[in-house]
Image (cartoon, helix red, strand yellow):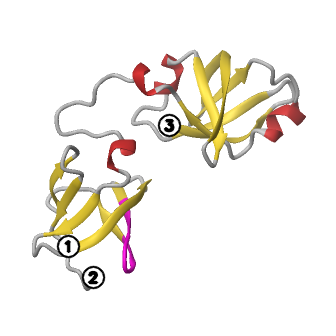
Amino acid sequence: MGRIAAPYAVRGWVKIQTFTEHLDNLLDYPVWYLGKAGKWRTYEVIEAKVHSNHLVAQLAGVDDRNASEALQGMEIAVAREELPPAEEGAYYWDDLVGLTVVNLAGETLGAVAEMLETGAHDIMKVTGTQERLIPFTDPIVREVDTEARHIVVDWGADW
């Protein structure tokens, strides 16, 4: 849902880059999971607020700048069961990663390795015989079936 971008001030606060639709969405969760490479640790959020175009937060046990520097680059997640259900036609990125991407001709282009946010629209990073960056927008994405584990796109195999 975000990442620790940098230390903020000298008392252990951290600056947060959010990956959520609304900047303040992370404020709804009192406990964050911080980690890299699948190794997560829970942190209680003592205080957090919007500051300019970022969030800043103070986490339990992070009391000085050195401790906040050690967290720089860590990803932020929350427990899946705490998230509300996705709205109709909307998807959590986590639900898309790993889905097979197939074009209208029935050719498998690969699987979604990662989702990227560019500001204009989301991008699927699809890995297979080659890496492709495919916009996750209409009219390119024709069907998403999370139960069948595939996404149908209007995208050429040679693009």
> Is disc 2 in contact with disc 1, using a CB cutoff of under 8 Å?
yes
Q: Which residue is depicted at the point 63% across and 49% down?
A: 37
Classify mark 1: residues with Cα within 10 Å, few (<14), some (14-19) or many (20+): some
Q: Position of residue 126 (x, y in %)?
A: 36, 66
Q: Position of residue 13 (x, y in %)?
A: 76, 27
Location of the C terminus (image quadrant):
bottom left
Helix, strand or loop for disc 1? loop
Q: Which residue is mark 2?
A: 159
Instruction: Relative to 23, say whether 6 is above or below.
Output: below
Q: Is tag 2's residue or tag 3's residue first in the polypeptide sequence?
A: 3
Q: Which residue is depicted at the point 67% across and 15% down?
A: 47
At label 2, the amino acid type is Trp
- In this rendering, would 106 be left or right of 17? left
- Magenta span: predominant SS is strand
Q: Which residue is mark 3?
A: 1
The magenta stretch spans residue 66: no
Quadrant of the rendered structure where residue 151 is? bottom left
Q: Which residue is depicted at the point 37% across and 80% down?
A: 129
